[in-house]
Amino acid sequence: MALEGLNVGLIALSAGLAIGLSAIAAAIAEKAIGAAAIGAMAEKEQLFGKGLILTVIPETLVIFGLVVAILIIGMAG
Amino acid sequence: MMQVEKMVKVDILGPKKWMKQVIEVLYHLNVYHMIDHQRTAELDIGSPLEHSEKVSEILVKIRALLSYLQIPQQPVRKMQSKKWTEKEYYELGKRSRELYLKVTNILEEKKKLEEQWQCNKELEEKLQILKKLNVHPRVLRRTSHIAYCIGTVGKEKDLRTHIANITNRFQLVEAREEKQHFLALFIDTQYAEKAKSTLAEHQFAEIDFLSVLQVLQERKLLQKPAYQSLRKIQDEQKMLQEKKESLERKLVALSKQYKEFLLLNEALLSEEAKKASAPLRFGNTKEAFLIHGWVPKARLQEVTKTLNETTKNSIYLEVAEPTKEKEIPIQLKNPKAMQPFEFFIHMFSLPNYKELDPTMLMAFTFPIFFGMMLGDVGYGIVTLALFLFLKKKIPSMKALLNIMVYASLVTILFGFSFGEFFGFEHVSEETGEAWCQNIGLCLEEEVLMAHGEERIVYSFPRLFNRLHGEWNVLGYDMPAVLVIGALIGLLHLNVGLLLGFYNVLIAHGFLHAIYEKGGWLLFEAGVAALIAYFLNQSVSLFAAVAILLLSCLMLLKGEGVKGLIEMPALFSNMLSYMRLGAVGLASVGLAVVVNEQFVIPYIEKGGLFIIVAIVLMVIGHVINIALGIIGPFLHSLRLHYVEFFTKFYHGGGIPYEPFG
């Protein structure tokens, strides 16, 4: 199936949305966790490792977004 | 391999007359991890050695001097610890007291000057206002007939008319400077209240002159016009400033003169103070003392021998194998080349005594992950040079910088296998031919399709095309690096699970290990079987589902409900390793943008544009390298901490801190 014009544009747009929205979601989640982690670190410095782990957990969302975006672009052929 | 240093518990019991020598020996050996004695009814804690007070008194003075003279604490050349005599303490005490007195006197004088300067400054500001308004200071004296307000207004429009509406017995002077509008209003006292409310409507902010009046009176300047007093004050300010600067010069000179002396004695006395206060951590009776602590097994003999020799066998040492794991201090044990990577373990949490120490694995995987993400010969060389340079400049961060040096080397290796040099994968036809003829560097000829045109380029040799390589996975074309990333993830996670199996085996026994970690491995097998069924039915659905159910039961038994909830996380963990490719693609992408959108078009224009191209190239690649250090570093670290460590690592060990 040959896709052209608007269709290709729509595919590109949805790939962009997939990664952009998931990045925003991860950012919102990390904002709260990061602030709390820094707060905890101010009290006890050894919590850096645990704080980092908790902060980056939502990052996986972006990776999912990326995979989906790549799959969508794959559809364009 | 991967074990932490074996420790033995050594308790030292001895008569008090040997206490000082025992402390000296332990301090000198620098291997004894001391544990504070908990006070009990029978065994109180000890009191500091008799010279402790003297030492801390001098130490406090010296540290105060270091801070007053703004000498930063820095390590002094390691010297033999010194045997102090009474006389030396006396001399040092006297000398530091004298210096302390000298410095505090200067500081006090300086403070006085500063206070006076501040006071003058306030006076100066207010006199400036009076000068501007052309008001003589003597009119500031309160009289019963005339009231005055001096200050700034925000809205000066129609002010005069509004006040004239109240009375005509007033005088208003105004002066404008920059954005501020100053005014002084003199008015019959009976209308003062009304005038004030009018002024308030014009956003009047009064400036208080009462304090100034007092100061002027004290200094007999009240009868002089403002500009005269102002000149006098300004002259005074200049003199004060000069005096202050001369005091500061004195301080700097003192700081230079006594820097070595203070730093050296601070170090020596800190050592002495540490030794003198050690008995506070001992158990203590009238005649004897008891110390609890740990010694690495490998150095036990050295410790017992030295202690026995020094005290002529008059103390008792009780050596015991560890029982309670939680109390054992942890000393990591790794080959020297891998020791820098212990930094990451310290940053996370030390392993507990029976756990495996993952430093060695991280020493392999961290640089590989980093290198795979950055993967560019040019960037690798730049970061290598940068970190070698920083290593010379900042010795305190040696461990981290050593790690980065390894990572940069691996980056260069990956750069060669991806055939990338500052984002360039190939050179143009002309350059390629020129290189081949002139310097004998013949690259491989390749045909590229760009914008529907065929173009011949000469590519750098490579094992693998990271930017354009694609693999077909289950019918989808995926960038090959992402797939490779996920596969590396699968491998890495399974190594983690196997390590976890070993850890649980040691800590809780075989059955537990089978349930807890074997469950995960079986779960993976079940999923693989299920995929095989859907692909070509080579495995029966019944078998796949049976394996999955069995693994669920094992996990439920091994890890409880938490295990079941975390099952999908295994896949998100694996997908998370796709960042190994993704971060790299982003980095190459940026480099390509810099090269092809900014640099090459300008170079093609020729002339002065080449300079623009070079500037753009430097800026673009510097930014990309900065991102390329931070990104891969954090992502590689995260893959270890979040995905890998959670499979086997608990941590929580107490760091081994030898007394000395």
Image (cartoon, rainbow, N blue to C red):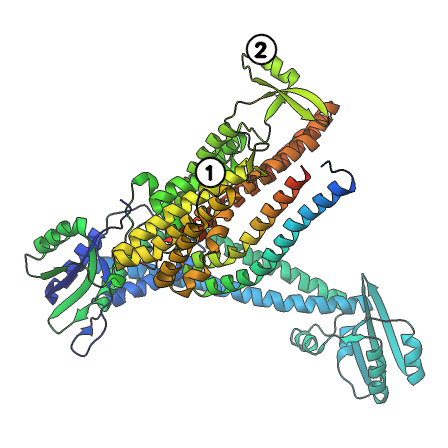
Q: Amino acid at mark 1?
A: Phe
Q: Chain of mark 2?
A: B
Q: Is residue B522 visible?
A: yes
User: Quadrant location of residue B451?
Assistant: top right
Distance between the Cα atoms at labels 2 and 1? 35 Å
Chain letter of the residue carrying label 1: B
**In this view of the protein, can residue B134 be seen by the observer?**
no
At 55% from the left and 33% from the top, the residue drawn is B466
Given residues B435 and B145, the one toward you in this image is: B435
x and y percent of residue B357 in the render?
32, 49
Determine whether B633 is above or below B419 in the image.
below
Ranked by sequence position, the earlier of labels 2 and 1 is: 1
- Residue drawn at x 84%, y 75% is B202
The residue singled out by tag 2 in the image is B438
Question: Residue B327: x percent and y percent?
Answer: 26, 63
Looking at this view, name the residue that lies furthest to the top.
Answer: B437
Q: Would you say B271 lies left or right of B591 here?
A: left
The residue lying toward the viewer, choosing from B152 and B440, is: B440
Q: Is residue B43 above or below residue A52?
A: below
Residue B387: numbered disc:
1
> Up-down: is B326 above or below B472?
below
What secondary structure is found at the residue carrying circle 2? helix
| Residue shown at 53% from the left, 22% from the top | B461
Q: Report x, y in % for residue B391.
A: 43, 39
Q: Secondary structure at mark 1?
A: helix
Q: Position of residue B53 (x, y in %)?
A: 26, 68
